[in-house]
Each structure stands twice: as structure tokens, then as C-alpha cells.
Amino acid sequence: MSKQQLASSDCCTPISSAVLDVEQATEGAAAFKALADPVRLRLLSIIASAGDEVCVCDITPQFDVSGPTISHHLKVLREAGLVDCERRGTWVYYWPIRDRMQRIASLLATGASA
Amino acid sequence: MSKQQLASSDCCTPISSAVLDVEQATEGAAAFKALADPVRLRLLSIIASAGDEVCVCDITPQFDVSGPTISHHLKVLREAGLVDCERRGTWVYYWPIRDRMQRIASLLATGASA
DNA sequence: CTGTTGTTTCGACATACGTCTATCTTGACT
DNA sequence: AGTCAAGATAGACGTATGTCGAAACAACAG
């Protein structure tokens, strides 16, 4: 836990200013894939809207899906480098990695006015 | 053709400043899903990097997948409101809808510094 | 040390998705 | 009309993904 997997090295080249090569596209698509589910998007929204961090025990009741399903989606967000977590006693707390969020957004944004 | 499907009405509320409700999350996830494929991301990159518009005949040779597959992915991008197209004679030309791109990006971006 | 609660992992299942080939549509040019 | 080329559509196939219940794991209480 508390380990980021994806490099996100060149995730900041906006797709409107230069054509992505296959590797960049694969990496970027993986990032967007993590966001491409309603449950995960709400999860990230809840975590990112919190001032600091959120306990899983406060998250799960807000959804209609089972605990294991929430856990699975949190893992996807973690592996995408969008959130990180830490266990403290019985509970596990999640917080957003805003730099990563910003970087993914800029993939789409920067060149959008060109 | 030349028809946009998705409303993208409230796609501008950044997920970091307010918790998305189920409907907003569903709509946002659908948008990200359109970007969650390497071929589509490269397609959008090619179309958005062009000054004006791009002919499909210039796009297809840049990929290793079949013509119908390219056509399918372009349709997904179209239905997501990210590109639009027009037939002129034998050829079909695509251009990006930058406003839509920007709006989706801002879902992720705005609150990312909070 | 045993029981309880919170969270993750495992295995299974149904559905969604990306890809292909074959076929259809549209327009241009004889 | 007849033919040809560019794209789109239809249907089929394999794989990936979201979901669940059951079980494992972690931390604490008695």
C-alpha cells in the first residue's frame, strides 16, 4: 500500500498541440480508463472534495454496491496514481493526488483553445 | 451525421469542489470512457492537432487496425460530442469540438489545487 | 486467546467492448 | 446504367470489466 505504480512521465503533453505516439496514447488511455466508471468518478469526487482525507467507512454507505466492489474501485484509482491511502488502526484513509489529477486534465485542456 | 448527442450540461462542475451526484458521475464517466482507448486518444490527438480538419483517408493509414475499426472509434468520439464530421464528395472530414474537450478537462482540473 | 468489526482478496458470472470480415451506402467518373 | 473507391454498418468472436458472495486478513475489545 501507499505505493504509486504508474509513471505518468509524459502525461502533460496536451493532445491538441502535438500528436501522441502509441506509447503516450496507451498511457493516457489507461489514466482515463480509471475515470471511466460512475462509481470511481464519484469516489474520486468524494475523496477530492474532502479537505484532507476520508475514511472508507464513511464512503461505503454512500453507495449501493457492496464493500468488496468499493474496495476494488479504490484499488483501480490507487493503481492509476489518482489517490493514495494509509491504514491507521482499524480504518483506512484515502486522499487525492491532485498533481496527478491536474496532469491528466492538462492532457485534454491546454491545447483546447488553439 | 453532424449531430451531437450528449448534453454535457453540467460537465463543468469540478469533482474536487463538490461531490458529484449519481447522474453527474454517470455522464462524466461516459465522457471519460470515450477517451479511455489508445486508438481513440490518438485519433482525437490527430484531429485536435490539425489546424482545421482532417480527412479520414489521411487518418486510417496511421493505424494498424482495419478501416471499420477506425470508423467505429470515430463514431464513439462523435457520440461523445468530442468531434464532428462532414462528407464532401467522396471524403469525410473530421474536426475537434474544443469546447467539449475543455469542459471535460475542467471536471478534473479546477479543484485540483484546492 | 477468542470474538467482532473494517477492509481487502479470491473465484465466479454476466455484460460490455475492441476487433475482424462481409456487406451496404454514397458519390464520382466513364 | 455500370463500375470503382471511401466510409459506415452489421454481425460474430474473444477478452476485459463490474459485480457479487465467500473467505482471508488486520486491528482491537473482552
Image (cartoon, coloured by chain):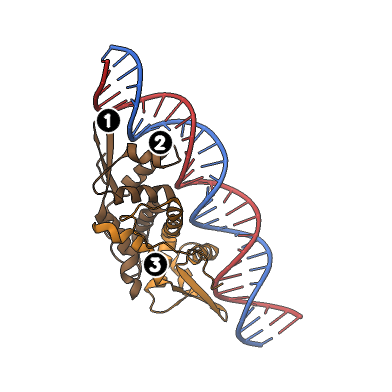
Chain colours: A brown, B orange, C blue, D red
Which residue corresponds to the image point at 35% horizontal and 43% vertical from the top-left? A74
Image quadrant assignment for residue A18: bottom left
- Parent chain of label 2: A
Q: Position of residue C4 (x, y in %)?
A: 35, 21
The residue wearing badge 2 is A67
Q: Secondary structure at mark 3?
A: helix
Answer with left or right where residue A44 lies relative to residue A53.
right
For the residues tagged 1 and 3, is the chain the same?
Answer: no
**Amino acid tagged 3:** Met
Q: CA distance from mark 1 to mark 2?
A: 15 Å
Q: Secondary structure at mark 2?
A: helix
For the residues tagged 3 and 2, is the chain the same?
Answer: no
- Parent chain of label 1: A
Which residue corresponds to the image point at 44% horizontal and 50% vertical from the top-left? B22
The residue wearing badge 1 is A90
Which residue corresponds to the image point at 33% horizontal and 36% vertical from the top-left? A57
Q: CA distance from mark 1 to mark 3?
A: 42 Å
Asked if the residue under mark 3 is in contact with the one under mark 1, i.e. CB atoms within 8 Å, the reply is: no
Can residue A81 be seen in this snapshot? no
- In this rendered view, identify the residue nearer to me: B104 or C5: C5
The residue wearing badge 3 is B101
Q: CA distance from mark 3 to mark 2?
A: 34 Å
The quadrant of the rendering that contains the C terminus of chain A is bottom left
Answer with left or right where residue B75 lies relative to residue A47.
right
Mark 3 is surrounded, within 10 Å at the Cα level, by few (under 14), some (14 to 19) or many (20 or more) other residues, namely: many
